[in-house]
């Protein structure tokens, strides 16, 4: 997202009242694993994509964001990924899902709403989704400037995904703090530690996939300790680094002179577990484009696939699973709460607001002066 787009988020929060979804859950027991029904070709295809679905006021005024979202949805349908993990699925969620075929993606997380209440994170899947939870970051930085990350509850979306009958994996989709300033860099460090603690808190051993917009990468000087704070303590491997950099996390000199996308901020991390071995097969950064070749988002998509095998250590998941549903009453209450919080943050940082608006006010003064001269 552009600097203008992120800075505009704070002002827009004063103007818009958009919903946040919260959830009620209904329980069911996991089905036992049936070895006879297991597929012969065990693969998972996924796309990790920041769809840039913020309201138009944040970005390029010439873009038709709704049309872009509909085209993204249609292309996701055409490509028929097993799992589509998205970020910034905000103000044009209806357009995005209008392009999605329910037969291709029959399972979808409950949308959490637009700016300022929603987190912009969603999963679209051909596999059943259970135990869905959304966890806001404990620390964020930027109200008017520096990405305005405090103005919407970005964080962690978790779902338990049943990739075949009785076979489950833990899936996380995140959106970390934007920008490279000192405050944002420090906030990401806390966020990666928070995510690591969440992964480590799960008592059931299962394979893990973590996707999202990390807003930093290992070759960046301000990577917020991504390797030390998240990957090492959780035993996670970066798919791109494993396939293209020989697993080396501290030397990217082979890519210093290339213009191609490499070690991007759109990441796919993974680990095997619970008697299920994941093996990455491929990974590419792709720009989804319209008929004229223009990118539909200001981010590339990370596209990859895994093979998985069940080892002799495999045992079926026995913990309770829940199916997430919308709770309209809590939705309304939460919406009001976030609107109030955002307004309070803006007006208690009035100096930042006036500094942000100063250039526009100056332009307005010049226009008025020219009109009467």
Image: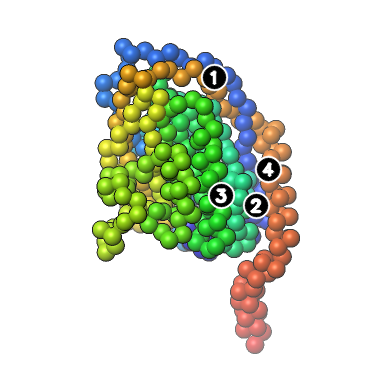
* Residue 61 percent location from the top left of the image: 50, 62
Q: Looking at the image, is mark 2 or mark 3 nearer the viewer?
A: 3
Q: Nearer the viewer, residue 360 or 265?
A: 265
Residue 162 appears in view: yes
For the residues labelled 2 and 3, say whether their Cβ atoms are less than 8 Å apart. no
Q: How many marks?
A: 4
Q: Nearer the viewer, residue 27 or 235?
A: 235
**First reached walking from the N terminus: tag 1 or tag 3:** 3
Q: Residue tagged by mark 2?
A: 16
Q: CA distance from mark 2 to mark 1?
A: 38 Å
Q: Secondary structure at mark 1?
A: loop
* Residue 233 percent location from the top left of the image: 46, 41
**First reached walking from the N terminus: tag 2 or tag 1:** 2
Q: Looking at the image, is mark 4 or mark 3 nearer the viewer?
A: 3
Q: Looking at the image, is mark 1 or mark 3 nearer the viewer?
A: 3
366 to 329, vertically: above or below:
below
**First reached walking from the N terminus: tag 2 or tag 4:** 2
For the residues labelled 2 and 1, say whether their Cβ atoms are less than 8 Å apart. no
Q: Secondary structure at mark 2?
A: loop
Q: Which mark is residue 320?
A: 1
Q: Residue tagged by mark 3?
A: 190
Q: CA distance from mark 2 to mark 4?
A: 11 Å
Q: Quadrant of residue 334?
A: top right
């Amino acid at each position: 997202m552009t600097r203008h787009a992120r800075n505009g988020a704070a002002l827009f929060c004063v103007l818009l009242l958009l919903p946040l979804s919260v959830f009620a859950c209904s329980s069911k027991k996991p089905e036992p694993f049936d070895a006879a029904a297991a597929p012969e070709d065990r693969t998972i295809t996924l796309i990790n994509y920041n769809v840039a679905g913020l309201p138009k006021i944040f970005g390029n005024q010439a873009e038709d964001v709704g049309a872009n979202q509909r085209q993204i949805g249609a292309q996701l349908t055409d490509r028929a990924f097993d799992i589509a993990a998205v970020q910034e699925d905000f103000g044009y969620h209806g357009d995005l899902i209008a392009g999605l075929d329910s037969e291709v993606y029959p399972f979808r997380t409950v949308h959490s709403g637009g700016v300022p209440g929603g987190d912009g994170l969603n999963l679209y899947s051909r596999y059943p989704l259970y135990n869905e939870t959304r966890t806001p970051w404990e620390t964020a930085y930027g109200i008017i400037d520096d990405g305005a990350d405090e103005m919407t509850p970005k964080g962690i979306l978790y779902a338990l995904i049943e990739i075949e009958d009785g076979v489950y994996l833990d899936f996380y989709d995140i959106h970390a703090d934007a920008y490279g300033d000192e405050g944002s860099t420090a906030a990401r460090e806390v966020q990666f530690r928070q995510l690591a603690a969440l992964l480590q808190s799960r008592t059931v051993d299962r394979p893990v996939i973590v996707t999202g917009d990390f807003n930093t990468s290992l070759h960046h000087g301000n990577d917020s300790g991504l390797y030390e704070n998240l990957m090492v303590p959780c035993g996670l491997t970066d798919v791109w680094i494993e396939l293209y950099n020989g697993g080396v996390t501290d030397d990217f000199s082979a890519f210093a002179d290339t213009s191609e996308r490499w070690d991007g901020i759109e990441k796919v991390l993974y680990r095997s577990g619970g008697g299920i071995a994941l093996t990455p097969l491929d990974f590419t950064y792709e720009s989804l484009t319209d008929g004229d070749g223009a990118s539909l988002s200001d981010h590339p998509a990370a596209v990859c696939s895994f093979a998985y095998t069940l080892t002799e250590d495999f045992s079926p998941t026995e913990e309770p699973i829940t199916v997430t549903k919308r709770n309209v009453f809590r939705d309304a209450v939460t919406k009001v709460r976030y609107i109030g919080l955002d307004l309070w943050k803006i007006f208690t940082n009035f100096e930042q607001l006036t500094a942000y608006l100063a250039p526009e006010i100056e332009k307005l003064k010049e226009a008025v002066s020219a009109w009467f001269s």
